[in-house]
Amino acid sequence: MEEVIFGSNIMQLFIALILVSTFMILGSTRLYSCVRAFGIQSFLLACVATVVGISTGKIDLYIVALLTLIIKAAVIPYIFIYIIREIKVKREIDLYVGISPSLIIGGILVVISYYLIRSISVITELSSFALSASMSLVSIGLFIMISRKKAIMQMLGILIMENGLFLGAISLTNGMPLLVELGIFFDVLIGVLIMGILIFRINKTFETIDTDMLKNLIG
Amino acid sequence: MISQIIISFFQIIIILALSPLLSGIIKKIKAFFQIRKGASIFQPYYDIAKLLRKDSVVSENVSWIFHAAPVISFAAVLTAGLIVPVFISNMPFSFAGDLIAVVYLFALARFFTALASLDAGSSFGGMGGSREMFIASMVEPALMLSIFAVALNVGSTNLSQISQTVSAMGLSAVSPYHLLAFVAFLIIAIAETGRIPVDNPATHLELTMIHEAMILEYSGKQLAIVELGAMVKQLLVFSLLANIFFPWGIADSVGFGSIAIALIVFLIKIIVLGAIIAIIETSTAKWRLFRLPDLLSVSLMLSFLSLVSFIIVKGG
């Protein structure tokens, strides 16, 4: 069953587009376009969940897709835009690693995750595309967290990692129990709210959300 | 044998006849988006005809390279025109070279244009030449990689064979790696044809021009050849884009009816691609020169991803 779903062309297409949206986040220097790319990525995840739902006939997955669409593709990007607008942050992101090197490192991470996934012998050849994509999302999310200076980008990085885990969970289990999914969605939403409040606090104390400045002593 | 020679001649004539029209159409579409009336779509023909009637003014200090460069570049681009499938997929001259030959024929044309720009000794020429080479150093690997992604799928680097196989596969050829390679190639096509955001073909502003800076010293008949060469190259890049990534409708055998249909389909594809380029040109600003590596590394990364996903999906 699993092979049929993940071998299908449309599924591969969505997964490739998810990878492309991740590279859009890696390759852009504007906060708004990063947030927009994250919204697109979540929308594509919802599409993946719907396709899996249609081919397995599980109603749960439609609910999961709908929740992804509402929470990750609409509410969370809105919270981001609200934060950006409220604290009047500079629209360009500062980087430790430049755009071109980031893209190249991203590509290397994709290859590494492919080889890591391939060494697991249980995985069939066909679902390995979804799994290595999810693995690369996790590693690229981590890379975004450590290579960007703005606290907002670190928040975005952890959400990309979460999206990667979601993709991995769907591709391995064809949909987890609804209760688990609901718990995760609630966690993510609360996490984003807490991180948002934290960013407001950082901004109030340090008058910047550049995490590089957090080392400075405040008297 | 005779029919194949006729086909080759016909293809060259079609390429020469259509390439100014394509430039004219792109300009017209751009004018439409900028709410201008714009020049007639046949204006490039008039321009070239006028330039051909004029004498060249040549600096006293130039060497033979300055005179030879337009001819060599033009010849290199036209030779590439014999290998690139335009309206028929089994090209008579496809045995003579594959996609690597096309890439290096373009590189040869570019090399001589850059040499000629240095030859006249004007400061703008040297600046344009160095910028062109800077961009070329990033465009070429990306161009190779993106076509390789499709070539791997077909199992051949021969352009005719790629075009035939993809067209025979039909819609099942549309796969993640195919689409990724297509987007990568689209970015490269913008860079290769010198369009916004890489270069602006409509301006002679000192600080930003690249291709225009290189040909600043040319006038009259030589300028006509250089301009026509650039237009032919643009048409060839577009037909590569059209006939490698979505070659459906291309004629696979010699026949009057199939070639007529293929020509019409080709014209539609080219106009659609021209419209896409025109939309991109109107909606984006020209990028700073030092931000271009970012754009081109996006293209390089997309073609790389396309190769990787090909290997993952096919289980290499």
Image: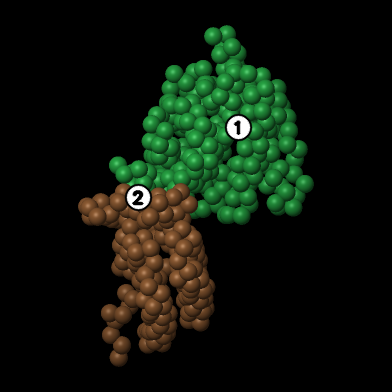
Chain colours: A brown, B green
Q: Quadrant of the N terminus of chain B?
A: top right
Instruction: Note whether B138 is above or below A114 in the view shown.
Output: above
Q: Nearer the viewer, residue B64 or B45?
A: B45
Where A38 falls versus A100 (above or below)? below
What amino acid type is highlighted by mark number 2? Leu
Q: Residue at x 40, y 29 (%)?
A: B156
Q: Are marks 1 and 2 on the same chain?
A: no
Q: Position of residue B247 (x, y in %)?
A: 55, 34
Q: Nearer the viewer, residue A12 or A212?
A: A12
Question: Please, which residue is most extreme toward the bottom here?
Answer: A219
Q: Secondary structure at mark 2?
A: loop
Which percent across, then down, holds residue A67?
Answer: 48, 73
Residue mark closest to the camera, 1 vs 2: 2
How packed mark 2 is, by other alpha carbons closer than 10 Å (few <14, some 14-19, many 20 or more), is many
Q: Number of numbered discs present?
A: 2
Q: Which residue is mark 1?
A: B249
Residue occupied by mark 2: A126
Kindly report the distance in space between the C-alpha atoms of the residues bearing marks 1 and 2: 32 Å
Q: Chain of mark 1?
A: B
Q: Element under label 1?
A: loop
Residue beneath the point at 25% across and 51% down: A118
> As rendered, which of B1 and B76 lies closer to the eye?
B1
Residue at (70% x, 22% y) in the render:
B53
Toward which corner of the image does residue B44 lie, by quadrant?
Answer: top right
